[in-house]
Image (spheres, grey):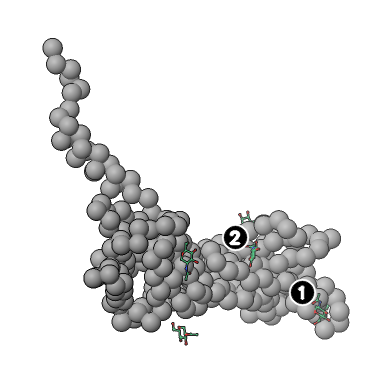
Amino acid sequence: MFSEYRIHPALLHLLYCLLCSAGEEVVRLQELEGNTVTIHTGLTGVQSDAHILWFYGPENADIKIVNSQIIRGEIITDYYSERLRDRLQLNRTSGSLTIRNISREDSGVYKLHIITGSISVWSFSVDVYAPVSKPVIRNQAEKRSVSLRESCSPLCSVENGKDVSLSWYEEKERISSISSSDSSEHLYLPLNKTNPDCCAYTCVAANPVSNQTTQLNITELCYNSTGRLKSLF
Ligand SMILES: *[C@@H]1O[C@H](CO)[C@@H](O)[C@H](O)[C@H]1NC(C)=O
Ligand SMILES: *[C@@H]1O[C@H](CO)[C@@H](O)[C@H](O)[C@H]1NC(C)=O
Ligand SMILES: *[C@@H]1O[C@H](CO)[C@@H](O)[C@H](O)[C@H]1NC(C)=O
Ligand SMILES: *[C@@H]1O[C@H](CO)[C@@H](O)[C@H](O)[C@H]1NC(C)=O
Ligand SMILES: *[C@@H]1O[C@H](CO)[C@@H](O)[C@H](O)[C@H]1NC(C)=O
Ligand SMILES: *[C@@H]1O[C@H](CO)[C@@H](O)[C@H](O)[C@H]1NC(C)=O
């Protein structure tokens, strides 16, 4: 009897290749706008006659941006993308690509092909962020009715952006947090808890590459002209 599990070697090879492409590892990079960023390959000694190609695209890496090969003993490196050209630098020893003054428009998928008889492929997903802005704390009660003007309810806000979150900290402990993926222009987070004996309240705005902190000054925000603490909330 034949084994039920016997698979033709060619089919096995096909299956393997489907798996290998499906499982292709994508290295994720998160970078701050304006920085010089090197997409490292981890390689140290790419064969000196290798044909090296870099591709880029916002969704799929389908635009050729770098082509470097040896033609009649001479290294010829072409940078194609008009937008990226003057900011790119290929390192042929490592295959790494350096992008100067990276911008948010440079976010996307970068793919490296190194061809030396066989072809090896690396994929990178690059997210570029603007630095987050500094949060602002104001007394929400001031905008309310006259009867509520004597109370104090600190409200922190910040300009929204990709992956921005806003949090209140009591000393080192995070007590509340908010984020929103919709395109609302600002994030708002009220301070809904105060410990009169406490310490420092800070509001922190953060994205994956930067953060900014504003400290709540209760004296400034919550005392009225006679120097009395307004009731909180
Ligand atoms: C190119 O990469 C190699 C290997 O990582 C490194 O030693 C070398 O300094 C790099 N060259 C430049 C010009 O950055
Ligand atoms: C960096 O790029 C921005 C546009 O993305 C440009 O306004 C700025 O002048 C550039 N800075 C440098 C130092 O090249
Ligand atoms: C404060 O707000 C957070 C979420 O914003 C909520 O989880 C928490 O229960 C609130 N605490 C109080 C005392 O209202
Ligand atoms: C804020 O950024 C600094 C580095 O700039 C980092 O050390 C710190 O952990 C960050 N804080 C928060 C709350 O994300
Ligand atoms: C808080 O605000 C008051 C009044 O504006 C000011 O005198 C004081 O120095 C501030 N405290 C801190 C810790 O910034
Ligand atoms: C200041 O706040 C205290 C406590 O809420 C209140 O009794 C007092 O009338 C306030 N004074 C002024 C001038 O608003």
Residue under pointer 1 = 217
Question: Which residue is more in the foreground, 161 or 84?
Answer: 84
Q: What residue type is labelled 1?
A: Asn
Instruction: From the viewer's side, name the closer residue of 192 and 71.
Output: 71
- Provide residue 109's location: percent of width, then percent of height: 35, 63
CB of residue at label 2: within 8 Å of ligand 3?
A: yes
- Rendered image quadrant of residue 147: bottom right
State left or right for residue 179 relative to residue 170: left
Quick check: 195 above or below 78? above
Tag shown at residue 135: none
**Where residue 211 sits in the image (x, y, percent)?**
61, 69
Question: Secondary structure beneath disc 2?
Answer: strand
Question: Is disc 1's CB within 8 Å of ligand 5?
Answer: yes
Residue in the image at 63% along x and 79% along y: 143
In the rendered image, the quadrant that contains the N terminus is top left
* Picture residue at 46% right of the left edge, 77% below the top: 100
Which residue corresponds to mark 2?
177
| Corner quadrant of residue 114 | bottom left
Residue at the top extreme?
1
Residue 172 to residue 144: above or below: above
Q: Residue at x 67, y 71 (%)?
A: 213
192 vs 70, nearest the viewer: 70
Amino acid bearing label 2: Ser
Distance, label 2 to label 1, CA atoms, is 19 Å
Percent x, y of residue 50: 30, 61
Quadrant of the rendered image containing residue 150: bottom right
**Sequence-first tag of 2 and 1:** 2
Q: Is mark 1 on a helix, strand or loop?
A: loop
Residue furthest out toward the front:
73
Local packing at callout 1 (Cα closer than 10 Å; few below 14, some 14-19, many 20+) is some
Q: Hey, which residue is sitting farthest right in the picture?
A: 227
Residue at the spot 69% in from the left edge and 73% down from the top edge: 214
